[in-house]
Amino acid sequence: MDRIRIVGGNKLNGIIPISGAKNAALPLMIAGLLSEDTLILDNVPRLADVAQLQRILGNHGVDIMSAGKRPGDHEYQGQTLHISAADIIDTTAPYELVSRMRASFWVIAPLVARMHEAKVSLPGGCAIGTRPVDLLIMALEKLGAEMTIDGGYVIAKAPGGLKGANIDFPKVTVSGTHVALMAATLAKGTTVITNAACEPEIVDVADCLNKMGARIAGAGTTRIVVEGVTKLRGARHTVLPDRIETGTYAMAVAMTGGDVQLAGARPELLQSALDVLTQAGAIISVNNEGIRVARNGAGIRPVTVSTAPFPGFPTDLQAQLMSLMACADGSSHITETIFENRFMHVQELARFGARISLDGETATIEGIKKLRGAPVMATDLRASVSLVIAGLAAEGETMVNRVYHLDRGFERLEDKLSACGATIERISG
Ligand code: EPZ
């Protein structure tokens, strides 16, 4: 199994190109199931999760062509996928495939909307909490699907097609909103989704669906209205930049010091995180090419932060912020409100010497002057990258094990960081 070796202590200086967002690319690829025509997606990141979803869609009979690079393309340019779901030959998504990636469960929505039936294994994914799918099932039930659970599979049937409905989510859910939105595009009549998630990835998917002929209004607000149509057509769409990758590298620079241009980043996608970084002492400026992050000399100031649905501070940056606060001049408090068990990085950060105590959903971090490198591993994607950030700032050598988690969500992580002066390498095997 691959490992990543880091020798910490170097400042980061240079340019980091930001990739397309994993959490938009995945639902956009799934949306390809809604049409017989080809959906072309540009700026799709080259990630293990994308490759895994290609296999899952392939199992339903979807042809996916990945266009090669063209002269003049930047070496980091994302790939272009041509997704053609002309013939869906199988409406079952088996355990072996779905158990590896939670988002693949979402295929249930386009399958039942277009084919009027779907059988999808209950999902797996990152070990960050219980992560039920009750609200996704509730949304499809409201739209008229008959839902049963049997042998670890969720079975959805709607022989006469889905029908528009009012779907009021009792809590904000990104997955529930994606599923309701995709399914409603082909339902008969009007669907109103209230307490909808406002995440930029929802807006990106809604934009793409509208290009495909859907009639969606209000994406990005808590009330989304969908007028169902009978068919969706092909379209071409560019995946928006990854706000979590942007925030991760911004935190890395805030921690090591230096000056980095995050090329292609869009500040409005992560304003709350940029505000927290400014409060912590980083210098953030926005220019035509993206976001510039610097920290020179001054120490890191402690912060008090709670995660929240967009536009709040994202749970997917919580672990990275904790690494940063491990070296702050004082005590910080970070409260996780989205997932009940998203603190696996705490124990591993302690291996660097970090002083963190947990009380329910709040972590108190007593900053120390310097972390010391250590062998570490993590059980989820964002926790893993928080260990990379800690390793970059720590004295001496860090070995990050179980790198496959990083490969799920960070494109060419070690290349991007070493181009900015980090001593970081992948050790294969
Ligand atoms: C998405 O997960 C992201 N994944 C997550 O990123 C992200 O952490 C999360 O949204 C929150 O922003 C993708 O987009 C692929 P939710 P999702 O439905 O959609 C509860 C990463 O590292 N809930 O908004 O699964 C749930 O348990 C990943 O890239 C129910 O109770 O998150 C959680 O407490 C990790 N019942 C809360 O809602 C349900 O049926 C929010 O979950 C569904 C969710």
Image (tube, rainbow, N blue to C red):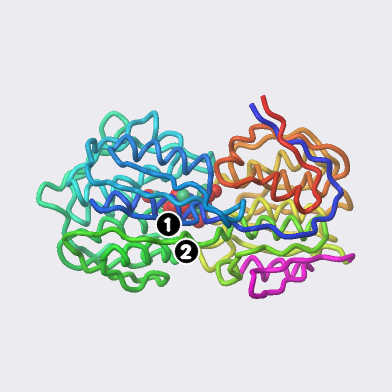
Residue 280: x percent and y percent?
76, 66
Q: Would you say 322 lies left or right of 48 here?
A: right
Report if residue 247 lies within the magenta region: no
Query: Quadrant of the rendered structure where residue 52 is?
Result: top left
Q: Label 2 to label 1, Cα distance in Å? A: 7 Å
Asked if the residues shown at circle 2 and circle 1 are in contact, with their CB atoms under 8 angstroms apart, the answer is: yes
Type of residue at label 1?
Answer: Val
Q: Label for residue 199? A: 2
Inspect this view and state whether residue 339 appears: no
Look at mark 1 in the image and give the residue it sits on: 174
Q: Which quadrant is the N terminus positioned in?
A: top right
Q: Label 2 CB, ligand 1: below 8 Å?
A: yes
| Stretch in magenta | 272-297
First in residue order: circle 2 vs circle 1 = 1
Q: Nearer the viewer, residue 1 or 188?
A: 1
Residue 22: x percent and y percent?
50, 51
Residue 396: x percent and y percent?
87, 40
Type of residue at label 2?
Answer: Glu
Q: Would you say 220 lies left or right of 299 here?
A: left
Vertical arrangement, residue 98 with respect to residue 289, above or below: above
Q: Nearer the viewer, residue 230 or 81?
A: 81
Q: Would you say 303 lies left or right of 17 here?
A: right
Residue 362: x percent and y percent?
65, 54
Q: Would you say 126 lies left or right of 98 here?
A: right
Local SS, label 1: helix
Q: Label 1 CB, ligand 1: below 8 Å?
A: yes
**What's the residue at 36%, 46% (across, down)?**
133
